[in-house]
Image (cartoon, rainbow, N blue to C red):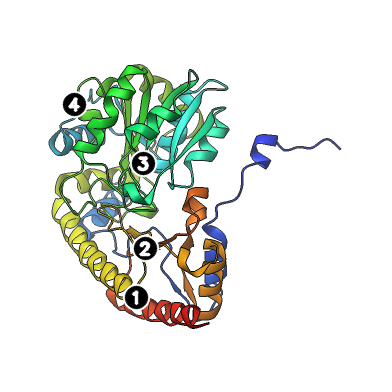
Amino acid sequence: MRDPLAKKVQQIQPSGIRKFFDIVSEMEDAISLGVGEPDFDTPWHIREEGIYSLERGRTFYTSNAGLQELKDEVARYQERRFGLKYDRKREVIITVGGSEAIDGSLRAMLDPGDEVLLPQPSYVSYEPCITLAGGVPVVIELQERDDFKLTREQLEAAITDRTKIVILPFPNNPTGAVMTREDLAEIVPVILEHDLYVISDEIYSELTYCGDHVSIASFPGMLERTIVINGFSKSYAMTGWRLGYACGPKRIMQEILKIHQYVIMCAPTTSQYAAVEALRHGDDDVERMRSSYNQRRSFLMKELWDMGLQCFEPFGAFYVFPSIQEFGLSSEEFANRLLQEEKVAVVPGTAFGSSGEGFLRISYAYSIEDLKVALGRLKAFIDRLRTA
């Protein structure tokens, strides 16, 4: 019998995150610091709007690109928060989470063999999505000495005559790194000089702790060559609602929409009505959650430093990325032993690319009480390693 499976799919590795949490789900008294999901409930007024939409019988398909009412709110949000102006009818598409927006953008823009510059460590979906779209991922290994930011020198060194797209995954998962206006100003001239396009994943844009997020699309000459991806999962604690969006030049967006039409039809109607409420009246909720995350971030950083663990200070998302290189264990070995010996689950840095070796991703999207217990167990574990 012939092999029924595509070779490019078989060559893609399963997510390095999931296997740890499959184990955790069956382990009594285990504490997980690995899942990138807010521990807050979706604010009640947002849930209420979703419930109300069901009570009103709003269970129909929406327009393929999304409710115009929601697209209007997305455009208003992008303008008031980041100074970006989009045609509300042609340059905004509502998607099933940010992940669909990433996949659709790559499939719409890549021909076989086109190269995509991918800074790592970064979100696990980028590399397989590039491969599935027929592109060639070219990894740029971000360095701790640069606070895991993309530098001009790294970008220039990676460009070839096949380079078409740069992915900008900032604020970053897993490192928590951000690119400031000054950082972005260094790489914009390189992008323009080489006529590159950018997919800017800004899903954590509201979760920054040292100044507001700056979008690369706000720089002169960049709006027409950038796809901005965002959503509701992180900022509004709406992970299970599965709703995101993409904004960009209409020529590109109309091709993304074709893919979306055939594969998805439209994003969930109930979620879209809830998202309208989130954008109209959710600013206070975002600020409340951001303030709480910042308190946890400060607590976690102090505890790690007190343990003697090296960790650069992150200013975005809700992750820290401490180094465990002093122990002579691989990231996976360290994470496995911590899970088995202390029942604390973290994610090995290699789940986010080979440049994550020697690091762990720890999420602080958990209560201070859970963090205290987990960090006590982590300290006991590393104390044993140091005295062994």
Residue that appears at 30% across and 78% down: 369
- Mark 1 or 4: the one toward you: 1
**For numbered disc 1, what is the local secondary structure?**
helix
Instruction: Classify mark 3: helix, strand or loop.
Output: loop
Cα separation between marks 2 and 3: 17 Å
Using the image as rendered, state which of residue 212 and residue 243 is in the foreground.
212
Give the number of the disc on residue 243.
none
**Distance from Cα at disc 3 to Cα at disc 4:** 21 Å
Residue sitting at x 43%, y 82%: 380
316 up-or-down from 333: above or below? above
Q: Which mark is residue 307?
A: 1
The CA distance from mark 1 to mark 4 is: 47 Å
Q: Amino acid at mark 1?
A: Met
Q: Which residue is mark 2?
A: 363
Observer-nearest of 385 and 360: 385
Residue 169's tag is: 3
Callout 4, which amino acid? Lys
The CA distance from mark 4 to mark 2 is: 33 Å
Q: Earlier in the sequence, mark 2 or mark 3?
A: 3
Q: Rate crowding at label 1 as few (under 14), some (14 to 19) or many (20 or more) other CA atoms within 10 Å.
A: some
Report helix, strand or loop for mark 4. loop
Picture quarter with the N terminus? top right
Judge depth for marks 3 and 4 and give the one in front: 3
Helix, strand or loop status at disc 2: strand
Residue type marked 2: Ser
Is any part of residue 141 visible from this angle? yes
Give the residue at x 53% y 20%: 111
Q: Which residue is mark 4?
A: 85
Q: Name which of mark 1 and mark 2 comes first in the sequence.
A: 1
- Which tag, 1 or 4, sits closer to the chain's start? 4
